[in-house]
């Protein structure tokens, strides 16, 4: 079963490396990793999809990512009511005769053509992984030149879900962190 | 089952694969996660000699020293966790000096990877910055092909270290052993095989037009095996050659066109020649900061040709006029016939005139009660007829060796240049001794450096390797003290360093050992050491406050060096004004 994590991190050089190295250290395969800015300045949000069936290991990756210094919070969105979306561009080679047919099928899937040039069109696809995959399949009959997929982004529904991210810096627990003057 | 295939354990496949790669000696240290491989070693004793080291860092330096002296791939083996992390310094040393090496590490079993198991470290990840490539083997069927790929990557293109991490369960599993024979194919790895023809004529035209050319000979001259070709180019067009630290030995130091080492501690005439040149022909070198000084004033009036196998080094530090991304030897074999023979008497004469002042300032002219480190090195040169394999450590003695020991043959100086790894010399010499069985080997090492890896004396003794160890003891971390003296108003913070009685220490390990504190005793004592079969040690007590000159301080131009004070002027530090 795939595991979807939403990770909030400090926007700093090297943070992507730190997150991906930490996951590789646990010997997990990253299926996709997407990072981008958020509504809060200085915070980067990553959606990480992992291929790890073992439940215990799934828990370990969440708890160990959470304790990294530059991570604000980690949400395991796998079993929550969340929306996972993907974006893809598809370039197919077309004859003029086919163009109308392609336009129609693109419209029927609520996608759009964003470029038509030199007997090729670029189609923009969005939706769930399933939507994107079936849309790509529907163009199988044509000569597909290129496909690019963004990887998945996820957002949990509602305003009061139990794992709402904590995006403020916590004060360290000085009671346990301080250096004692004498033993 | 096919006759050519055998059912073997992963551990056996490791040894079979090493044997297929022509490995005769490995340097290693056993431990929990590599136990199956060590158990299997017992079946391969007649084909592979295993050297038990005393520290895994020593194993990597030994593999490195073996690789540098032989040109073959050196192999080091260690267990997981601390065994593997101890190898990191050795891998970093090898990658900065382009030394081909394969490090094999045991890893905890696949089922517990990622659980912070006993002696678990993600060494595949941790070694990324210090290796050319690193592998974690997750499928026994891929073990043989991975080891083969590791050797291929280590030795081809610009050589470097490769790590293969093998979980314990993979070592225990069995499979058919089939060593692949098809060409290795890696998506992003394409060492150049051909040169661009149009570059060759341009190269030759630039050389033919130059009046004041200088060849910069780097480690690539040795790695490419292009020593003959470089000399041919130099002799044909009468081009003086400056070498980098690692380029020493690639061209014969005694040849009149060979100027010597360039850079921070290069002789002044060498650096002046580079600064005054109208053409630099950079052969297999990377314009390291220790070689160029500040780039703002680096050889301002010269055109530059750069022949380099690693594309990422071209135009990295110094922008060049002609970049040739290819194997050096191949290029020169094509270019040399296009070069017009010429004699550049004026240019060669000018450079030798700069030499005269340096001769007067030479440290060997100094009359001192105390033994000087440079004198020791010059005597070692005399006492070995300049033919020994010298392995140096890092610091003042390293630079003095480069200045005062003339190397006429390739691969006779092994030293940690790029990383400057203290502790390198003793293990590297032990490693090299497994290739250089006839040649005399001398370790030249400072008292500080020696104490970083002295545990390998036990390895030297156990293997009875024929090496001579010369400790140049000045009671200081000399090079750091030199910087403190020049740039920190002689505030010596933690550079005075005490040492054990090295003679007693060596005797405790079972080595014959001697102490020398006068010039007259050097050669006679060397003779005692040379007669010893197996390792022996001489401690030279030298002047404490000696400095390595000339010195180009960090951040200034190559021509703005600090010269050794003129013998008549006493101890003043005079900044030499450029003669240009």
Image (cartoon, coloured by chain):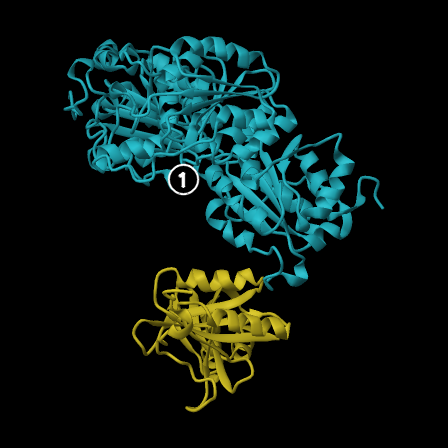
| Rendered position, B407 above or below A37 | above
Left or right, residue A72 beside residue A84: left
x%, y% of residue B558? 23, 29
Disc 1: CA contacts within 10 A as few (<14), some (14-19) or many (>=20): some
| Rendered position, B15 above or below B285 | below
In the rendered image, the quadrant that contains the C terminus of chain B is top left
Disc 1 secondary structure class: helix
Q: Is residue B217 visible?
A: no
Chain under disc 1: B
Left or right, residue B327 beside residue B458: left
Looking at the image, which residue sits at the far front? A183
What is the count of numbered marks? 1
x%, y% of residue B407? 43, 16
Give me the chain that's yellow: A
Observer-nearest of A150 and B161: B161
Left or right, residue B160 beside residue B51: left
Give me the chain that's cyan: B
Observer-nearest of B209 and A140: B209
Left or right, residue B336 beside residue B19: left
Instruction: Look at 50% across and 44% down and name the residue there.
Output: B132
| Rendered position, A20 above or below A66 | above
User: Image quadrant of residue B210?
Assistant: top left
x%, y% of residue B160? 50, 38
User: Image quadrant of residue B116?
Assistant: bottom right
Instruction: Look at 44% across and 61% down and name the residue there.
Output: A18
Observer-nearest of A50 and B290: B290
Q: Is residue A78 visible?
A: yes
Which residue bears the numbered disc 1?
B311
x%, y% of residue B449? 44, 32
């Amino acid at each position: 079963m795939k595991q979807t994590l939403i990770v909030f991190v400090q926007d700093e050089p090297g943070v992507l490396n730190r997150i991906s190295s930490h996951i590789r250290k646990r010997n997990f395969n990253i299926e996709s990793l997407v990072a981008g800015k958020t509504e809060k300045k200085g915070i980067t949000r990553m959606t990480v999809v992992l291929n790890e069936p073992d439940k215990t290991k799934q828990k370990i990756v969440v708890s160990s990512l959470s304790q990294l210094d530059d991570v604000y919070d980690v949400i395991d969105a796998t079993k929550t009511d969340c929306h996972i979306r993907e974006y893809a561009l598809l370039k197919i080679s077309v004859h003029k005769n086919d163009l109308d047919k392609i336009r129609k099928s693109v419209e029927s899937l609520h996608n759009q053509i964003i470029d038509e040039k030199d007997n090729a069109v670029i189609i923009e696809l969005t939706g769930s992984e399933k939507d994107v995959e079936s849309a790509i399949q529907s163009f199988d009959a044509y000569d597909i030149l290129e496909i690019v997929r963004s990887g998945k982004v996820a957002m949990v529904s509602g305003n009061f879900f139990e794992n709402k991210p904590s995006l403020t810096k916590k004060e360290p627990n000085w009671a346990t962190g301080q250096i004692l003057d004498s033993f | 089952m096919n006759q050519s295939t055998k059912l073997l354990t992963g551990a056996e496949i490791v040894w079979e694969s090493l044997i297929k790669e022509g490995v005769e000696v490995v340097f290693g240290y056993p431990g929990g996660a590599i136990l199956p491989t060590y158990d299997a070693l017992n079946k391969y004793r007649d084909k592979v000699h295993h050297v038990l080291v005393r520290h895994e860092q020593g194993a990597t330096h030994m593999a490195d020293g073996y690789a540098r002296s032989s040109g073959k791939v050196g192999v080091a083996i260690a267990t997981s966790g601390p065994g593997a992390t101890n190898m990191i310094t050795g891998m970093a040393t090898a990658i900065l000096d382009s030394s081909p090496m394969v490090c094999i590490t045991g890893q905890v079993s696949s089922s517990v990877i990622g659980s912070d198991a006993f002696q678990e470290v993600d060494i595949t990840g941790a070694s990324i910055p210090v290796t050319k490539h690193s592998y974690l083997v997750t499928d026994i069927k891929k073990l043989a092909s991975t080891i083969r790929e590791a050797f291929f990557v280590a030795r081809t293109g610009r050589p470097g270290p490769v790590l293969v991490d093998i979980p314990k369960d993979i070592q225990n599993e069995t499979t058919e052993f089939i060593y692949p024979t098809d060409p290795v194919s890696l998506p992003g790895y394409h060492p150049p095989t051909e040169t661009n023809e149009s570059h060759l004529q341009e190269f030759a035209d630039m050389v033919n037009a130059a009046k004041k050319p200088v060849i910069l000979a780097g480690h690539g001259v040795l790695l490419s095996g292009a020593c003959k070709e470089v000399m041919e180019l130099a002799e044909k067009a009468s081009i003086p050659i400056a070498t980098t630290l690692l380029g020493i030995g690639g061209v014969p130091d005694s040849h009149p066109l060979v100027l010597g080492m360039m850079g921070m501690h290069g002789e002044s005439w060498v650096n002046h020649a580079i600064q005054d040149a109208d053409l630099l022909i950079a052969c297999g070198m990377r314009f390291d900061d220790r070689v160029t000084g500040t780039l703002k004033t680096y050889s301002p009036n010269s055109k530059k040709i750069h022949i380099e196998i690693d594309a990422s080094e071209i135009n990295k530090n110094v922008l060049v006029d002609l970049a040739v991304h290819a194997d050096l030897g191949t290029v020169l074999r094509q270019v040399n016939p296009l070069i017009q023979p010429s004699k550049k008497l004026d240019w060669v004469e000018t450079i030798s005139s700069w030499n005269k002042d340096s001769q007067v300032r030479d440290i060997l002219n100094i009359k001192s009660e105390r033994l000087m480190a440079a004198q020791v090195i010059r005597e070692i040169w005399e006492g070995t007829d300049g033919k020994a394999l010298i392995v140096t450590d890092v610091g003042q003695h390293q630079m003095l060796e480069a200045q005062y020991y003339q190397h006429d043959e390739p691969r006779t100086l092994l030293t940690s240049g790029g990383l400057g790894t203290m502790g390198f010399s003793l293990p590297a010499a032990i490693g090299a001794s497994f290739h250089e069985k006839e040649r005399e080997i001398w370790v030249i090492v400072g008292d500080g450096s020696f104490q970083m890896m002295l545990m390998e004396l036990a390895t030297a003794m156990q293997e009875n390797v024929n090496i001579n160890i010369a400790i140049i003891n000045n009671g200081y971390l000399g090079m750091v003290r030199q910087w403190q003296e020049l740039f920190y108003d002689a505030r010596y913070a933690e550079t005075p360093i005490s040492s054990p009685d090295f003679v007693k220490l060596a005797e405790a390990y079972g080595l014959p050992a001697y102490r020398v504190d006068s010039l007259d005793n050097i050669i006679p004592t060397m003779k005692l050491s040379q007669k010893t079969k197996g390792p022996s040690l001489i401690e030279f007590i030298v002047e404490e406050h000696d400095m390595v000159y000339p010195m180009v301080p960090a951040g200034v131009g190559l021509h703005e060096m600090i010269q050794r004070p003129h013998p008549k002027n006493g101890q003043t530090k005079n900044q030499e004004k450029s003669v240009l």
